[in-house]
């Protein structure tokens, strides 16, 4: 599964790393890639992600969660 998370507030590469590490710590993911220019973070995983927890993790890191779409 692929989750595309819209996130606002990323300004630099360190912001991207902060998002990536927070998601890795909280979820079992295969790949995570934040992109500040697109305000997007793409997460690849074999398992479902709890979307409420995902929103909380993003907010805890200090960024604005704008929504998520899921692809199979």
Image: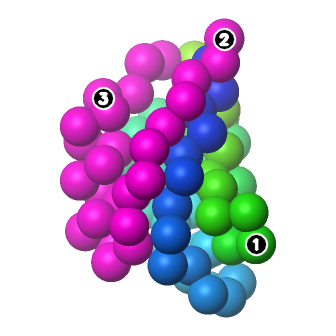
Q: Please say whether residue 62 is one of the residues in the magenta stretch.
A: yes
Residue at the disc numbered 3: 50
Q: Report, in whole angstroms, how far the alpha carbon at label 2 lies from the one at label 3.
A: 16 Å
- Residue 4 vs 69, above or below: the answer is below
Mark nearer the viewer, 1 or 2: 1
Q: Which residue does the image show at 73% across and 63% down from the upper left?
A: 38
At numbered mark 3, what does the secondary structure look like: helix, strand or loop? loop
Q: Quadrant of residue 44?
A: top right
Queried whether the magenta region covers residue 64, the answer comes back as: yes
Q: Is residue 2 above or below residue 18?
A: above
What segment is highlighted magenta in the picture? 47-72
Residue drawn at x 39%, y 57% as measured from the top left = 65
The numbered mark, 1 or 2, whose residue comes first in the sequence reads 1
Q: Is residue 30 shown above or below 70? A: below
Residue 53 bears which disc, if any? none
User: Label 1 vs label 3: CA separation?
Assistant: 26 Å
**Disc 1 designates what residue?**
37
* Residue identified by numbered label 2: 72
Q: Foreground residue, 59 or 29?
A: 59
Instruction: Give the quarter of the figure containing the N terminus.
Output: top right
């Amino acid at each position: 599964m692929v989750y595309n998370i819209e996130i606002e507030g990323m300004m630099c590469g360190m912001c991207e790393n902060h998002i990536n590490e927070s998601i890795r710590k909280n979820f079992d993911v295969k790949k995570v890639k934040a992109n500040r220019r697109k305000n997007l973070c793409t997460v690849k995983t074999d398992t479902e992600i709890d979307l409420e927890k995902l929103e909380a993790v993003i907010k805890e890191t200090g960024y604005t969660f704008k929504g998520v779409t899921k692809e199979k």
